[in-house]
Image (cartoon, helix red, strand yellow):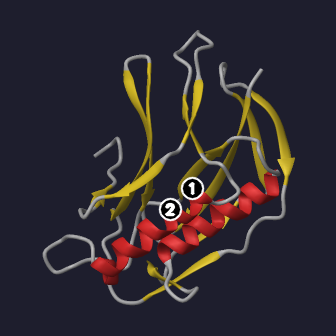
Amino acid sequence: MALIMRYKSIWSMPSGGPGVTTMFAFPDTTEQVFADAARAFLNDALATSGAADFLPSLCSIQGEAVVDNIEVESGLLDSTVPVTAPAVITGIGSGAYAAPAGAVITWLTGLVHQGRRVRGRTFLVPLANTAFENNGTLTAAYLTNARNAASAYIAGAANPCIWARPTPGAADGAAFAVAAGSVQDKIAVLTSRRD
């Protein structure tokens, strides 16, 4: 029975929230190291000089105080391990912002499972207006920031993975190591299923 770790960070925002960022990793390290690495990735993707200036000032992100261990094949919860919740990431980006607009990091594995490329996505929404150009694309500064954060997370101690969930009624889930992260120079927009 193979296990992977799952960690959630909750986004608080004045409208459209709360949001959640869910990350997965192989159990090659402790749950605390994984939780801290997930928080560091989010902070680095949203901050310059340690302050979350690409996150609007009305928003914050709090990592949970637990890491779940999931059975890869079945998707069943095996155990929950308490961790010290990482420090809150508090946005300092000033000015107006578009609540459903931000960026997306695509995690690449270079592998195929059940006839499909295995990849995952982490949405960073919303972003402060300083992350956007006047033409609706992302600024060079933000792209560099997010790409560097993704590279550091992959190279760090967490050993992140993408989990291909099992199909209903089957035990065919699988996990794959993240090989690279890609941030396209275009805005990601999140919509509700009710929209």
Mark 1 burial class by Cα count in 10 Å: few <14, some 14-19, many 20+: many
Amino acid on which disc 2 is placed: Ser
Position in image of residue 2 (x %, y %): 74, 25
Nearer to me, 168 or 33: 33
Which numbered tag is attached to residue 154?
Answer: 1
Residue at 67 percent across and 74 percent down: it is: 88
Q: Is residue 36 left or right of residue 191?
A: right
Q: How far, Cα to Cα, is label 2 from label 1?
A: 5 Å
Instruction: Tell which residue pokes out farthest to the left in this image.
Output: 135
Residue 189: where, in percent of width, then height?
29, 57
Residue furthest out toward the right? 82
Say which residue appears at 16% left-offset and 80% top-offset. 134
Using residue 174 as the reference point, say whether residue 145 is left or right of it. left
Q: Are marks 2 and 1 in contact (CB under 8 Å)?
A: yes
Q: Nearer the viewer, residue 144 or 58?
A: 144
Task: Name the residue beneath numbered marker 2.
Answer: 151
Does 55 sit above or below residue 64?
Answer: below
Q: Judging from the image, what secondary structure is the residue with disc 2 in?
A: helix
Query: Which quadrant of the structure image shows residue 90?
Result: bottom right
Q: How many marks?
A: 2
Q: Quadrant of the N terminus?
A: top right
Which residue is at a point 35% across and 41% down the rendered structure image? 193
* Residue 139 horizontal/vertical position (percent): 27, 78
The amino acid sitting under disc 1 is Ile
State the residue at coordinates (50%, 80%).
47
Snapshot quadrant of residue 183: bottom left
The residue nearer to you, when weighing 31 against 158, is 158
- Confirm whether residue 9 shows in the render: yes
Q: Is residue 136 left or right of residue 170?
A: left
